[in-house]
Every structure is written in C-alpha cells, then in structure tokens.
Image (tube, rainbow, N blue to C red):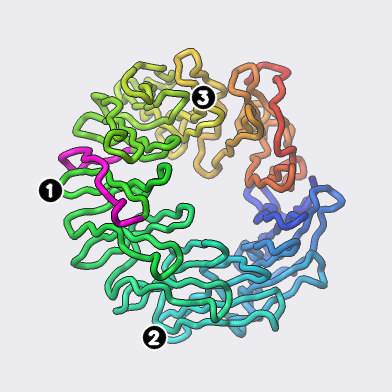
Amino acid sequence: MKIVIPPGSGASSNGPYPEFLVGAEGFLYFATNFFDGKAVLWRSDGTEPGTVPVKSFPEVFAAIPRLTDLMPFGDKVFFMLDDPGTTGRELWFSDGTDSGTHLVKDLTPGPGDTWFNLVTRQGGQLTLFREWSPTPDGSQVELWRTDGTSLGTVRFRNFGPPVTLVPSSFEMGGVVNFFLSRPGQGTELWRTDGTANGTVLLKQLGASGTLGGPSLQTEGLFYFVLTSPGHGDTLWRTDGTANGTHALKSLGTTEAFRQTLLQVGGLVLFVVTSPAQGTALWRTDGTTAGTSLAKKLDAQVVTFTHWTREGNQALFLFEDGANTEVWKSDGSPAGTVRLDAFGHHVYLLGVAGSKVLVYSPDYTTQRLRIQSLSLSGGGKSSVKTLPNPYANEPSAYPFLAWSTRINGRLYFAAGIGGTGPVAREVSLWVSDGTATGTLLLTNGINPGDEYVPPFFAISEDSILFVASAAATGLELWCTRGTLATTGLLQDLNPGPSGSIPQAFSYFGDRLYFRAFDETRSFQLWSMPAHLTCPTPLAPSP
C-alpha cells in the first residue's frame, strides 16, 4: 500500500516494522521504529496518497521500540514515547497533524518514565491508572484523567502507599471496577466513572483475602475467587454495586478450584476437587440459592485435559487412570453425562458437525490417530491415522500445533518433531468428522517457533493462511476446504525468499498487514477484508 520503511535504512527480515496499528474514526494510525532510535507516527485513510507521516522523532539512544501503545481517541490518537534525557517515557497526543502532536504532560518530572497499568476511555476523556513507588514505603496507585491537553490532564485520586493494583479489572456500563490490595488490610473492590466523586469503595473483601484463581465476566455479573489463609477459596460475584457483591460458595481449606469458570447458557460451571470428596461439577446462576452441586464426576481427584464450551453445554475430558473420559453438561444433573471412554490417553481436537474429534499420538508407530464419537453419546469410531514420512527417523514424533472450527469444519495443523527445536514439517488439514472428509491441504505451514502463521476466515467459506512452497517461500494462501480450492493467493515478494506476512488488523472493509517485499523491508499492505478464494491456476505445490 505504501513504502513506509525507506530502502537502505538498515532494514531486514528482522525489522524494523510498521507496527501498533489502531483504527480511529475514519483513520488508521501506526508507528515505525528504527534501530537508531528514530520513530515516525503515521496516519492513513486506507489509500496510498492518504497514508502520510504525521510526525518524525529524531535519532536518540533509546530502547526499541520507542513509540508504543497507540490508543484511539475519536479520530485522534494517544501514544507513549520515550524521550531519554528530557521527559523520559510519557504520554503524547496527536490530532493527525505535525503541529497537533505534542507531549500531554510530564507526569514524572524530568527524565523519569511514567507507566500506566490500565487505560480506558470514559466519555470524552481517558482514565489512567498509574502505579509507582515514590518513597521507600512502597507503591501507590493514582487515578488520572486527560482530554489530550496539559490543563485537562489531572490527578483526581491518590490511594496512598502502600497499595497495589490487582491485575483483574472489568467494565460495566462505562464504569471501571478494579481491585486494590493493601498489606495487612486485604483486598478492596472499587469503581470509578472517571471523576473524583464517582470513585468509590464498593466493598472490603477481607483483611487477609487475596485475589487468585479463575474469574469470569458475564452479562451483568463478574465472578472471582478470593483466597484466605485458614479459609481456603471462596467464589464471589458482583454486579458493580455494594449490595450486589457477596460470596456464593466457600470451599474451605481441603477443597480447590480445578478449572476456569465456564459460562453455559444462563449458568456458570466450575469444578471442585478434594482428596476426601474427589471431583465434582458445580453450577451457579449468580445467587446463593442457585449455587449447587451438578454432579459428582469421580471419587478421585482427576486431571482434566480439556474444558471448553460447545453451544449451550460444556465439553470436557479427564483422565481416569489409563483411560480418558469424555463428558458433556448443560449444568443440570440429568444433562451431565459421560459420552464415552477411551482405553488410552486422548486429547480434544474439536467438534465437527455432531461429532467430537479426539487425537492421540502413537509413539511406537510415530503417527497421530484421530477418532470420533457422537455428541449424543456413543458411536465411537476411527477417522484417520495421519501419515508420517519421517517415522523411521529419530525424534520424529507427531503433535498437534493448533486447531480451530470454521463453518462447521475443523482446520488443524499437525506437525512432525525433529532432533532440534524446529519441527521437520507442519501440515494443514481439514475435517468434517469423516474419513473421506479429512483431507491434507498443504504441508507448507511454517515449522519454526519464531513466526506463528496467521489463520482466519475472510468470508463464509474462505480461509486465509500463510504457507511456504519452494518457489515462493512464506506467502499468503487461501482455501475453501478442498484441494482444488487451496493455493497461493499472491506472491508479494517474488522468488523463493517469501514475504512473511504478519500483524493482521481489520479496519473498515480492508485487512491490513505488513510483509517483507522487493524493497527488502517490511512495508504496509492491505487487501479486501472479505473475499472468496479463487480456484488456483495450477495444482498446489
């Protein structure tokens, strides 16, 4: 779309990059940070003529990247910039012009840096949570608000030392709810609307309680776990009011949460284990009376290998000795049932249609076996054993890199290990849950761990991903889930080197990303956000 990294600027496949793309109202902002400390803020309307540098910052000795944390604000943007020796790392603001780009305020006077733990937009301002340690007494938490001007940037609450901001916050109706922890005083739940009068303590949660374990936000409620010495774990809920904040279930010191909280319909499910009671599934509707045992799953404490939501029910696998049991639950005792059991360890691949697919690596044959069973129970069958052309070589063990369901089918990447940190091969497969519908699409997925190839739907039946062929290297590919519709979309960097596309971001009706092209640098590219994969002109490599 635009050459934003000048050729000859010391760029390579290791950077620098166009980065931190954020969409504002009608515009896209991004940054380019260079190895010598230079930085440029850019603005784009999605066209080449409309992609222009807003402000350039000269070379300095600073940590790279220097310009970071772009935050949209209407059609404007806030960002953090490091200016060592003068103001340090501070908050800046831009209206998209050079003259309208300026330091907001030097909150840590002099060359010291300012760090924000949480930033959120409330009304026509940003609310900033700042945590720092001005004295040996410990850290303190401050609340600031800004409209982008120095006069409009004010501190409206200081919670005083020693206090820390607990990294669990949530928003409800434009109000930010957050937790503070004080030594000897425990955990407090607060809320703020971005004003001094609207910043109030909702509830003191206990003198010795600390926030830990799982948490979950549903429509209108936030669930969290408070842990207290001598009392164990307690499940709480809050609706953002003092009266609506209370405990639902205390587990005691002998019990513990084993899984994250999972929303299923109007219920939240959770697993409780104890040496004496084994493993049990519990449910809550957000009330004390509605918090109850759904079903005892096992007399022992078992290891869960997967726990996920499938429609309006939970789907989970756990190991019972040498067996793996597959369960589903809608949160009711009658609706919590074991679908089937396997006489060996299996792991969840996903759901395709009405079938649950599981996989298991066979370390004797060095192959990956896929099996299925019906969501309605039983119907266990073999789907496919994936080939391994390296099966007779050392450490050529199969593994599953990732899987995702798109349009009722499962796409997954299956790899073959190597003697070093890089896999020998990673292949892209698709499955509808049947043997004939489980197909190899390409074996060109990048096997390294430094570059994670993107993979996502760009229309109802078209999938965009990055794969490699000998003639092109890593480039954009597309598929509609068949061999005939799988192929190279475009060779952005002609030849075998590849363009290594990455950092995809939707904005308007376009999909933006960076790619290493014939300029020998990463540049900004764009494509339609939605398209149907064309039939390849030639067979897939």
Note whether 311 is above or below 229 in the view shown.
above
The residue that appears at 49% across and 62% down in the rendered structure is 170
> Type of residue at label 2?
Asp
Label 1 element class:
loop
Q: Are marks 1 and 2 in contact (CB under 8 Å)?
A: no
Q: Which amino acid is tagged 1? A: Ala
User: Percent position (x, y) of residue 200?
Assistant: 47, 77
Calculate the distance from the C-alpha at mark 3 to the C-alpha at mark 2.
57 Å
Secondary structure state at the residue bearing disc 3: strand
Which of the two discs, 3 and 2, labels the residue nearer the N terminus?
Answer: 2
Q: Where does the magenta region start and end?
A: 287-305
Asked whether residue 481 is in view, the answer is yes
Whole-angstrom CA distance, mark 3 to mark 1, is: 44 Å
Q: Which residue is drawn at the image coordinates 68% and 27% (left, top)? A: 488
Describe the element under mark 2 as helix, strand or loop: loop
| Residue 369 can be seen in this image | no
The percent position of residue 137, horizontal first and vertical second, equals 39, 85
Q: From the viewer's perspective, is residue 339 above or below residue 132?
A: above
Choose the circle earlier in sequence order: 1 or 2. Answer: 2
Q: Residue at x 74, y 74 (%)?
A: 102
* Residue 273 shown left or right of residue 83 in the figure: left
Q: Which mark is residue 137?
A: 2
Residue 367 within the segment the image draws in magenta: no
Does the magenta-highlighted stretch encompass residue 304? yes
Q: Quadrant of the C terminus?
A: top right
Q: Nearer the viewer, mark 1 or mark 2?
A: 1
Q: Which residue is mark 1?
A: 276
| Image mark for residue 268 | none
Q: Quadrant of the N terminus?
A: top right
Vertical placement of residue 255 versus 302, above or below: below
Nearest to the observer: residue 398 or residue 186: 186
Q: Position of residue 467 (x, y in %)?
A: 60, 31
